[in-house]
Structures are given as structure tokens and as C-alpha cells.
Image (cartoon, rainbow, N blue to C red):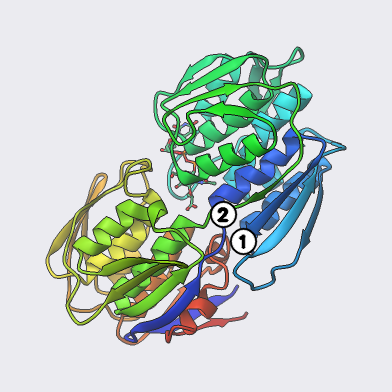
Amino acid sequence: MDRIRLRGGRPLDGSIAIGGAKNAALPLMAASLLTPQTLTLGNVPHLADIATMAHLLQQHGVDVSMDGGNGTPEGRTIHLNAGTITSTVAPYDLVRKMRASVLVLGPLLARFGEAEVSLPGGCAIGTRPVDLHIMGLKALGAEIAVEGGYIKATAKKGLKGAVIRFPMVSVGATENLLMAAALAEGTTVLENAAREPEITDLCDCLIAMGAEIEGVGSEHITVHGKPSLQGARHQIVPDRIETGTYAAAVAICGGRVELTGTRIDLIESVVDKLREAGCSVDETPRGMTIARNGSRLRGVDFLTQPYPGFPTDMQAQAMVLMTVADGAAMITETIFENRFMHVPELARMGANIVVHGSSALVRGVPKLTGAPVMATDLRASVSLVLAGLAAEGETTVNRVYHLDRGYERLEEKLAACGAVIERLKD
Ligand code: EPZ
């Protein structure tokens, strides 16, 4: 398995191109199942999770072709045609690799009246049930049984619009229900819907496919179902978590970097915190710049919340910044119950962190020291790369396949800005 080796202590200087959002691309690819015509997506990031979703869709019979964009800021374009579907079953072997596979449930059920999707099972960051997806689809009239580890759903007479109030905010459940409602008969109202930019991106694409949706970007979304949808072309929104991660890299290393192909309005809660901690962040015509010169980072508190609050997918990166900040910081995780897996690894690098339930008290230390480390999920892994960039001496991050699920050419992008970082192939 590949490893990343890095040597800390160098400021970053230059520019980094941000790709399309992984977490927008995955539901958008699933949306191709809603139409027999071709859906073309631009700005698709080159990531392992995208390949897994392409593989799953091919297994359903979707014709998937990709072109262009190798290494360019525009990324790859992917054409998806679900004109002929050969299977409505999403098997365990694929779903267990990537939980977002469950996003094929809503579209398959809405268009074909049946779907069988393996339950995803446990995950490193929490139990992550899919009960809200099931509750919402049942409200649209689906009959659903969970048998042999599979969600078996049927709606022989089609889905019917309904009012669905989510008891808690769920990105994935909102996406599955939006896609299902687009082909349901009548009107569906989603209350307490997720408002993440990836949801807005999905709504924009569904509208381009002929869906009628009101309240896009709000917690109250109304979908007037259509008997069929058509093909469309859609450009994927920039990845706000990739943006925030590289901003955090500059915050911890110092220096000045322009992040291009992104938008500051996607990560306002992160920008506010970076400024509070002592960084300067400015909008540019191509994206944004982030800089920290001289002064040490200041300790600030973080509380993860659904969008527009501070994202859970930036919690590990924020914690690393606080490990070397002046003062203490309280970091509270409200979305996932087990998302502090990076804490013991950071402690091995000299961080002073005490966890009490869903909060971590981080007392800043003057420096971290390099060590061999590994993590069990994507964002925890990248937080260890950030820690290595700030640490004295050499750090090796193992289990790089986690990073490859969500960060394209991470080591190249950082090395181009002066970081001493390389991938060791095994
Ligand atoms: C999405 O996961 C993202 N994944 C996650 O990104 C992200 O951390 C998460 O949203 C929160 O922002 C994709 O978009 C592919 P949720 P999702 O449903 O949709 C509970 C990354 O690193 N819940 O909003 O699975 C759940 O357990 C990943 O890129 C239920 O209880 O998240 C969690 O506590 C990791 N029942 C909370 O809701 C349900 O039926 C929010 O989960 C569904 C969710």
C-alpha cells in the first residue's frame, strides 16, 4: 500500500487548483438513473470514489464514458446513459466499499418501481444508519423490507408525492428523496432538508433535466414530480472541503497561496474561523487567497453543524491547526459520534488533546514532531498530512488509499507550493 512521506516546516507559496466536489459528483452520477437520455457532467474529480460509483452504475447497465481533462483545472467530463438497465440490485461487494452507493435507491425505485440495495453497514466515523432514507421513500408509497442485509423496495404503481419532515438534517436522505420525488406523481415537500451546496448543485442539475423544484438552497424544498426527465449537461460545483483543507494547510504552514477554481461563498463558516485564528483570506477573480505571515495561530473554538454551520468534514483539519495554536480550543462534533479517530495519532506527534464525549479540548503546543501515523477515514488521514507539514522532522502517513478517495494529486499540489512531500509506492 502506498504511503506519503513528508518533512515539515516549510511555508507554502503558489497556487492550487481545486477540483469538482466529490460529494456533489456522487449523487449527480446516481441522478443519471432517472432518465434514458445522456447526462453529461463536467468538472468531475479524479478520485477512487468516483471510479467506485462509475463501477456500480455500470453494474446496473449504465453506459459510462469519460473524456478529457487529465490534470486540467476543468477536470474530466463523464457521460452517463441509463437507456438500458440490466439490474436494479446494488450488491454488498460494491456498497460496502462506499456508503454513497445507497444514493441509487431513490432513482432506481422512482424510475423502475423496484430496487434492492445492500445496507452499507458500519463505518469508521459512526453508525450512520439509513433509516431516514427508508422513512422518506415509504412516505412516497414505497413498500420496503430489510432482508438478508438488503433494502428491498418496490413501488409497482409508482411513487406518490407527500410531505416529509426529516427529524434531523441528513445530506444523503435529502438527496435520495429529491431524486425520487422528481419522478413521483404529484407534489413532494421536504421539510428540514439539508442545505449543503452539494444539494443545491443536485437541484440545479435536476432542474436542467426537466424537474420542477422550488426552495432550492433552503430547508423547505418543494418538488413537483414529472412523468419523465431528460438528459442534460451540468458543471459540478467546486469542492468546498478540498478548498478548506488547502486553506488549512496554508494556515498551519504559513505563506500565501491562491486557491483557484473555487468560491469563497461555499466555505464562509471556515473562512470566518481562519480569520479569527489569525489568517487573511481574500476573494480573487479566480477563487481566493489565504495567507499567514509571522504571527502564531490563535486558539478558537469550533462546533460542527449542518450547512451553513462549520462542516464536520473540516473538523479534523481544524483540530490540527489548534494543536499548534497559542491558547486552548474546544472542538465539538455534533454530526458523527465517532469522529475523533485522529486524536490518538496527533497525540503521538506531540499534540495535547483531551476528549470528553463529543468535545475535544486542545491545548496548543509550540511544535509537533514527525512520526509514522495512519488513520481510518478520509478527513482524519488528510489532517495527519497537515500535521506532518507543520511538524519538525519526518512523518509517514500510511493507508494512503483513504486520501485517494477524496483528494486528487494531493502530494503534487502541495509539492508545487514548496512542501517537502512524496508518495512512496509499495
Ligand atoms: C454526507 O454523508 C457526506 N457524504 C459526508 O462526507 C459528510 O460528512 C456528511 O454528509 C455530513 O455533512 C457524501 O455526501 C457522499 P448525513 P451522509 O446523512 O449523507 C445521521 C466525507 O468525508 N443519519 O447528513 O451519509 C448520520 O448517522 C464524508 O466526504 C441518520 O441517523 O451524512 C449522521 O449522524 C464522510 N439516519 C447524521 O445523520 C439516516 O438515515 C448526518 O448524516 C441518515 C443519517
Q: Nearer the viewer, residue 189 or 139?
A: 189
Please say if 367 is above or below 130: below
- Whether residue 90 can be seen here: no
- For residue 227, what is the image quadrant? top right
> Is there CB contact under 8 Å for labels 2 and 1?
yes
Q: Earlier in the sequence, mark 2 or mark 1?
A: 2
How many discs appear? Answer: 2
Quadrant of the rendered structure where residue 180 is?
top right
Which SS class for mark 2?
helix
Spatial distance from mark 2 to mark 1, Cα to Cα? 7 Å
Three-letter code, disc 2: Lys
Q: Which mark is residue 22?
A: 2
Task: Left or right? Give the position of 135 relative to 417.
Answer: right
Residue 418 position (above or below residue 170): below
Residue at 70% from the left image edge and 36% from the top image edge = 209
Image quarter of the C terminus: bottom right
Q: Residue at x 42, y 84 (%)?
A: 419
Disc 2 within 8 angstroms of ligand 1 (CB): yes
User: Residue reaching furthest left?
Assistant: 327
Q: As drawn, which residue projects farthest toward the front?
A: 285
Residue at the disc numbered 1: 45
- Above or below 189: residue 242: below
